[in-house]
Image (cartoon, coloured by chain):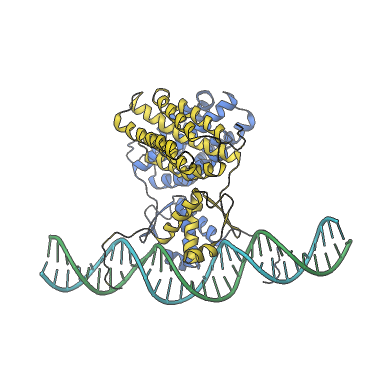
Chain colours: A blue, B yellow, C cyan, D green
Amino acid sequence: MSPRRREAPPGPTEAARLADDLRDRILSGELAAGTPLREQAIASDEGLSRHTVRTALALLSAERLVIQEPYRGIRVTSFTAEDVRGLQELRCALEAEAVRLACARYGQSWPDEVTAPVRAAMAELESTAREHARNWPVVAAAHAGVHRAIVAAANSPRLQEAYARLDSEMLLLLVNLRPNYSAEEVANDHRDYLRQIQADGEGAVRRHLDHGTQQISPRSSR
Amino acid sequence: MSPRRREAPPGPTEAARLADDLRDRILSGELAAGTPLREQAIASDEGLSRHTVRTALALLSAERLVIQEPYRGIRVTSFTAEDVRGLQELRCALEAEAVRLACARYGQSWPDEVTAPVRAAMAELESTAREHARNWPVVAAAHAGVHRAIVAAANSPRLQEAYARLDSEMLLLLVNLRPNYSAEEVANDHRDYLRQIQADGEGAVRRHLDHGTQQISPRSSR
DNA sequence: ATAAGGTACATTGTTACACATTGTTCCTTA
DNA sequence: TAAGGAACAATGTGTAACAATGTACCTTAT
């Protein structure tokens, strides 16, 4: 109980740090879908206690990046076509509602302070598609930024948060499924999508996401 | 490592059991919004280790029934009007999408095997409203059953799960806010709602939930 | 009287270790 | 080949101690 020198605010807990690290490794594809995550092994590798590892894994489990079963351990989430459909349905519910709220508030002409972040995210996606076309995780992350910006237009923190929570899953899915969907196509599809949203509202959301579902489904044949 | 007598499948872990117990106590109002949940105190009260209590509290935190802040402990979630709005927006997104999917699949005449669970849940709500009119948590739970049954009509496990996850929050909110909304009114409103859904789809969802938001908002004056 | 600083206390976060419980795999026996 | 049992792996739980952080309260300075 010595006097504390408080020069910087405390950082995140070790458990949160480890969860961040593991999340990055999952989303980069380093820890592939289905990979078991062993408490003791991670604890030894990272120089942490098993208790801390369990706490970190619980955080990831809450995000559905991993699936935990009692006494059987934790595995990185894997995806079936059914999972893709479910995730897209959920995204569609949230994004369509967000777009509907935005259209209800702004009509067909959203104000500049609402569209600016969307346009910025789109610019980011386009430059990413050009410069990192083969780096799918990076493209997927820029893609997620566009959708997040669209949902943010609704100014509904709860919808935003619920949508953002799906990002990790979406990224995991895209990283693991490796859809036949080039970075250029992604950028083009999203440019079109942005054009259609304000005019067409939810309808544009549905068409876009249905198209996306076909592009990324494991049974997709191209 | 003695031979195991396996006469029944193993039950839930102690941590899951404790989480269930605490959830019930939160949702019954026994543990009011804002109440701190102290690890050591719970561990002593329940005859469990702090380790197990932490695990249980992490489960509740993932459900948002409690709010956890590093080094500051865990409190039962409390609600502002803003929270009500956000939760209703999220519910609306999910339920509207579910109803839209059901209408897209079945048209304006849902088949009997789809409507039967909804009707059963409605019957349950009505008998609950009659027999337990003053027991708000019970009425709120029956109310939740109706909405869950409606969402289930979409046959989208992911939407169902996301919606069901909101149940605890919704119940917590209703238990803590004590809206001026009688059990009879709840039953009547939902009978009307069921009549409108198949014919009117999402529009009925929005009207119903907007009405609900006004009924339950903390600033509601009646 | 108010603000700042320091200390005590409460609680959470982490470590370490051990044992209990459950699931899986492999080997033996019928 | 199928069933049963043992060994092993991994998680779930308990205990204890210490580290880290936040809060409350008291003392000192202005």
Residue A57: x percent and y percent? 46, 58
Q: Is residue B189 visible?
A: yes
Rendering quarter of residue B163: top left
Say whether residue D4 is left or right of residue B33.
left
Residue A56: x percent and y percent? 49, 59
Count of all numbered marks drawn on residues in the image: 0
Q: Quadrant of the N terminus of chain A?
A: bottom right
Residue drawn at x 41%, y 30% is: B99
Asked whether B55 or A61 is in front, the reply is: B55
Q: Is residue B79 above or below residue A47?
A: above
Residue A140: x percent and y percent? 47, 43
The residue lying furthest to the front in this view is B131
Asked whether A64 or B57 is in front, the reply is: B57
Q: Quadrant of the C terminus of chain A?
A: top left
Q: Is residue A141 visible?
A: no
Residue A212: x percent and y percent? 42, 35
